[in-house]
Image (spheres, helix red, strand yellow):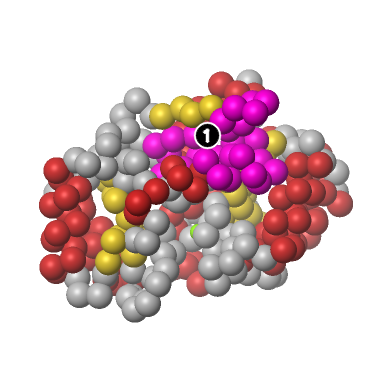
Amino acid sequence: MRDIQQLPFENAQGIRFVLMDIDDTITTEGKLPAIAYEALWKLHEAGLKVVPITGRPAGWCDLIARQWPVDGVVGENGALVYWQEGSHVLRLYHEHAVSNEHEVLRRIEQRCLAEVPGCRVAGDQFCRRFDLAIDFAEEEPVLTLKEAQLIKDICEQEGACAKISSIHVNTWMGQYDKLGMAARFLATRFGYDDAMDRDQVMFFGDSPNDEPMFTHFGQSVGVASVIRYRHLIKHLPSYVTKLGGGEGFAEGVEVLLAKR
Ligand SMILES: [Mg+2]
């Protein structure tokens, strides 16, 4: 990983899309700092296409699509993308997305609560349509990554997909992911060509569940906290910021915009 300051001018000038994880990438200790929200506005005002890519729920994505300075938002780990055209919010759902009323998810919920003491259904579950989120670190008590792995194992034993984020284990039925939905949205909405245009995308992330995006897109940036997970990530981002969380995101955005 190179310091983001070493981003070449010609790479910065080629960027058309800026994608970012939300939790612990643009937030710091659970809050969206003013400087990170301002950075989103600066990207938007510079004419770049801004698209958060998150495991957060459909209900949150409706708000983000309407009120944040973004061109779309991929939510629930790739089950959906919401974006605004005029006064309308448009919604695209992955054809493999299955309602989270599914009996397998009910069984997973019961098993996790019984077999991993202290874990709980995430507080934002009522806003979700397709996935079940088990909270291990957003609220107290904070459990270890080892316990998160136990939760993930239960999900996979029951035949569901599962990903560990910095706060939740998300689990769902149906084959889809953040990367596939992000590339599909850029292609259908903005004419992006995933075979040719990967260098036009800068992606910001912080943790192992961002690795597929770090690998795929030409210009990937880890906020400083990514160093904590170094041993868990095979394909590290191309660049790293000095600061962590939302402050690190703002630092990266400053460099990108200054070099354009
Ligand atoms: Mg994150």
Depth order, front residue of 201/108: 108
Whole-percent x, y for residue 23 in the image: 52, 60
Which quadrant of the structure image shows residue 99? Answer: top left
Residue 50 in percent (x, y) is at: 67, 41
Q: Is residue 165 visible?
A: yes
Indicate the quadrant containing the N terminus: top left, top right, bottom left or bottom right. bottom right
- The correct choice, above or below, for 237 with respect to 197 in the image is below
Q: Is residue 196 left or right of residue 111?
A: right
Q: Report which quarter residue 144 is drawn in.
A: bottom left
Q: Is residue 96 left or right of residue 13?
A: left
Q: Is residue 18 above or below residue 225?
A: above
Type of the residue with mark 1:
Tyr
Image quarter of residue 130: top left
Q: Which residue appears at 49% of the width and 60% of the height?
A: 207
Q: Residue at x 42, y 68 (%)?
A: 138
The magenta region covers: 62-89
Q: In this view of the protein, which residue sits in the foreground, 176 or 79?
A: 79
How many C-alpha atoms fall within 10 Å of the one at disc 1: few (<14), some, or many (≥20)? many
Q: Is residue 138 left or right of residue 201?
A: left
Q: Is residue 198 visible?
A: no
Residue at the location (53% across, 68% down)? Answer: 30
- Looking at the image, residue 202 sits to the left or right of residue 104; the answer is right
Secondary structure type for disc 1: strand
Q: Quadrant where the C terminus lies?
A: top right
Q: Residue furthest front?
A: 87
Residue 164 falls inside the magenta stretch = no
Residue at the far bottom: name it: 141
Is 73 in the magenta? yes
Q: Position of residue 234 (x, y in %)?
A: 45, 57
- In the depicted structure, whether residue 197 falls above or below residue 129: above
Residue 26 picture location, percent across and down = 62, 59
Residue under numbered circle 1: 82
